[in-house]
Amino acid sequence: MNSITTVPDQDALRRIGASVRARLEGDPGVYKIPSDRAEIFAVGDFLTPVECERFVRIIDVVARPSELHDTSYASKFRTSYSGNFDPHDPFVKGVSRRIDDLLGINSICGETIQGQRYLPGQEFKAHNDWFYTDQPYWKGEQKRGGQRSWTAMAFLNEVEEGGHTFFSEIGASIEPKPGVLLVWNNAKPDGTPNLDTLHAGTPVIKGMKYVLTKWYRTRKWR
Ligand SMILES: O=C(O)CCC(=O)C(=O)O
Ligand SMILES: [Fe+2]
């Protein structure tokens, strides 16, 4: 007898992967990080210095100790402070739409943008952004838009030391540069989860680090 393994949302992930890839590869302002194991792209000056500063101020207002699905702040896995931006704020809305437009993903699939602040010693340990579909939380996430396809993350300030975004399987350690937007496909071209997108926010050694993150789902996020 054949055993059939099904990967949730695989067809949608394959389709979104292909359309976003084509769009980014055709955009002269987008740089592809050399790797044949993951699709990671960078855009310099995606945000202006004034926009970065404005987001930093918003983060200082909304940031609370970061929680993850199955791990509390006290577990020390994600020790940054984070918070959601107001999706109705015209400034937030404008930048959010620019990210949607860069990727060519329908804005209904985008989660609310989240801001994050790391103080010295704070970090986000190695993780993947997709949902583990064998975990109890998946049932809920499946109804809230399904699997995560692409991640967009912008650096908002200069960090004196540390605080890189480190893709350990690719061997890429990306130094925070204000205004730079990183985007990556959490799936492989065939729509299965890409384990090689494992990444960490390495501990900040000196200074502070501010970022914003927008995750996209395969369907309408709610
Ligand atoms: O802060 C970083 O460099 C990584 C953040 C991250 O991985 C995330 O927000 O999913
Ligand atoms: Fe992440």
Image: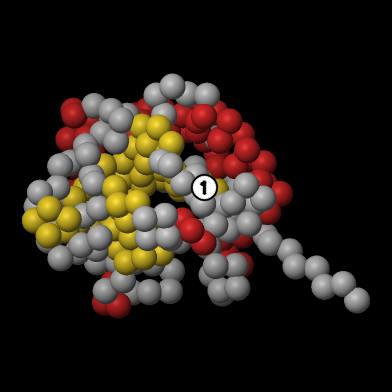
Which quadrant is home to the N terminus? bottom right
Task: Report the front residue among 113 and 170.
Answer: 170
Give me the residue at 41% from left, 64% from top: 127
Q: Is residue 93 above or below residue 146?
A: above
At label 1, counting other C-alpha atoms closer than 10 Å, the crowd grade (few under 14, some 14-19, many 20 or more) is few
In the rendered image, residue 15, in percent from the top left (x then y), is placed at: 67, 41
Judging by the rendered image, the residue that carries numbered circle 1 is 36
Residue 120 visible to an observer of this rendering = yes
In the rendered image, residue 9, in percent from the top left (x then y), is placed at: 67, 54
Q: Is residue 150 above or below residue 118?
A: above
Image-quadrant location for residue 82: bottom left
Residue 80 visible to an observer of this rendering = no
- Is 16 on the left-hand or right-hand side of 66? right
Image-quadrant location for residue 44: top left
Outermost residue toward the right? 1
Secondary structure beneath label 1 = loop
Task: Report the front residue among 187 and 174.
Answer: 174
Give the amino acid type for the residue marked by disc 1 in the picture.
Asp
In the rendered image, residue 182, in percent from the top left (x then y), is placed at: 37, 41
State yes or no: Cβ of the residue under disc 1 lies below 8 Å from any atom of ligand 2.
no
- Is 99 on the left-hand or right-hand side of 204? right
Give me the residue at 23% from left, 30% from top: 51
Give me the residue at 8% from left, 56% from top: 206
